Amino acid sequence: MSNAKPFVPSDSNIAFANETVQQLDLLVADRKNWESTVYKKSNENLYELMAKCKKIFEDKFENATSDNDRKAIRLEIAHRLTADGIKVQKNSTTLTMFVRYVFGSDRKRAHGYAYVLKAAISHDIRADGLVKFITEAGGIEEIKRKMVASEKAIANKEKREKAFGLVKTKAELHELSPLASLDMPIVNNRTPYVV
């Protein structure tokens, strides 16, 4: 057992701590001002830029009059991205290519923005409602978090269904040709399978 005495701050310690906390309080006020002005405006500008990107995607790609026009858009954007040193995969969606073209080579950021635009599309949000959609959803990071979680949940569900299908198939096969037979009453069994 330790006999160390608990720390008791002196008057000068308390004054020093209070001065530090007062300086932090000033930073809190600065942060609140920044959030309500510069940061808010910056996010609004970003959301508007994303909405403009989505508008061009809707007008020029989704509403293109021919598949050849769509192919030409993909080809030209891929060519320009490659010329700028940005790697383009053949399976990249056109929407992701639009976003990468507009926002540059920062792959992680571009894919995040593409997630947000895909979420908007899945909710039938057109370009003119995108700013409101992102704002009401809590911002880009919140939408990305929800999209990634839902994709992961979907993948997990598919794995469970596949595993259940394999178990069910094996159980049915073993029912047709069992290793042994045993006549035994089974109570409270709600499925055709018993272990």
Image: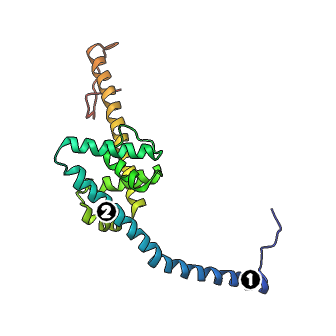
Location of residue 10 in the rendering, given as x and y in whole percent from the top left corner: 79, 83
| 190 relative position to 11: left or right | left
Q: Is mark 2 on a helix, strand or loop?
A: helix
Location of residue 140 in the rendering, given as x and y in whole percent from the top left corner: 40, 61
User: Callout 1: 10 Å neighbours few (<14), some, many (20+)?
Assistant: few
Q: Mark 1 points at which residue?
A: 16
Q: Residue at x 40, y 38 (%)?
A: 89
Is residue 163 something one can see in this rendering? yes
> Which of the colour schemes (rainbow, by chain, secondary structure, one colour) is used?
rainbow
Residue 193 versus residue 129: which sits nearer the camera? 129
Q: Quadrant of the N terminus?
A: bottom right
Q: Residue at x 19, y 51 (%)?
A: 63
Location of residue 95 in the rendering, given as x and y in whole percent from the top left corner: 32, 49
- Residue 61: mark in rendering: none
Location of residue 153 in the rendering, given as x and y in whole percent from the top left corner: 36, 45
Q: In which quarter of the image is the C terminus?
A: top left
| In this view, 21 is above or below 146 | below
Name the N-terminal-most of marks 2 and 1.
1
Identity of the residue furthest to the left in this view? 65
Q: For residue 132, what is the image quadrant? A: bottom left
Q: Mark 2 points at which residue?
A: 51
**Count of marks, rendered view:** 2
| In this view, 116 is above or below 19 | above
Q: For residue 103, what is the image quadrant? A: bottom left
